[in-house]
Image (cartoon, rainbow, N blue to C red):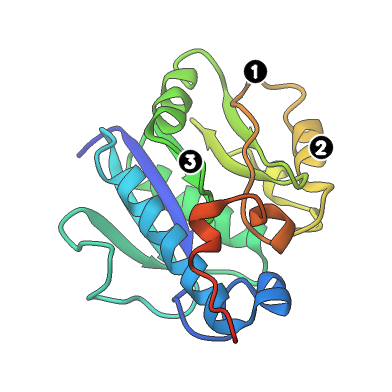
Amino acid sequence: MHKNLIITFTRNPELGKVKTRLAKTIGDQSALNIYTFLLEHTEKTIRNIDSDKAVYYSVSIREKDIWDNKTYQKHQQQGNDLGVRMQNAFKAGFAAGYKKIVIVGSDLFDLQPKHLNEAFKALDKNDAVIGPAEDGGYYLLGMKTILPSVFETKEWGTDTVFNNTIKDLQNFKTYHLEKLNDIDTFEDMEHNSTLKKLLITHD
């Protein structure tokens, strides 16, 4: 077993159930196309990192999908809100004996292996590592021990999450990765030619 663990949370890619804010502008099928693309990009980015890997599914675990069973541990998300679900995933990882755990989002066009490698390296000398997102949230969070306040009393999905998380981490040595843009609205992708090619156009 490796001492490092990468966790990613995923929604099962189903029409009308993913990227709902984006779908309001571009329609359900285009939103699904984009989510599927971002999921595949995340899998490729994580695949060769020197660590163990776990995928946590929102609804039900899929045995045959892009997450290869030999490479990825598969789990069900547990809890009523995102904070509880993330905390439970970290707890399970530490209980299994991992020393450094990083959770990363699955909707980042700009995510690269270097961000994950930098996060693990940062945990050599820091208590926590965080990757701020353009929308006021974060795309990556890493720690060496469970810091419960980070997961509590947040308005998930709002622009207050990053700042409130940093307040919770003020007594801990925290490393900041570069800011990235996660894809939640049309504005997030309107200048991205790769993603725009996935839109279904109606004549």
First in sequence: mark 3 vs mark 2: 3
Q: Is residue 77 visible?
A: no
Amino acid type shown at disc 3? Leu
Q: How far apart are marks 3 and 1 (CA)?
A: 24 Å
Residue beneath the point at 58% across and 51% down: 192
First in sequence: mark 2 vs mark 1: 2
The 10 Å Cα crowd at callout 3, few under 14, some 14 to 19, many 20 or more, is many
Residue 133 drawn above or below residue 36: above
Residue 111 shows which numbered tag? Answer: 3
Residue 83, image quadrant: bottom right
Quadrant of the snapshot with the C terminus: bottom right
Q: Where is residue 169 in the image (x, y as percent from the top left)?
A: 72, 29
Residue beneath the point at 73% across and 78% down: 24
Q: Position of residue 201 (x, y in %)?
A: 57, 79
Quadrant of the snapshot with the N terminus: top left
Residue beneath the point at 76% across and 47% down: 135
Q: Label 1 belongs to which residue?
A: 173
> Which secondary structure, mark 2?
helix
Count of numbered labels shown in the rendering: 3
Q: Which residue lies furthest to the front in this view?
A: 203
Which is closer to the viewer, label 3 or label 2? 3
The 10 Å Cα crowd at callout 2, few under 14, some 14 to 19, many 20 or more, is some
Q: Position of residue 112 (x, y in %)?
A: 42, 36
The 10 Å Cα crowd at callout 1, few under 14, some 14 to 19, many 20 or more, is few
Residue 163 shows which numbered tag? Answer: 2
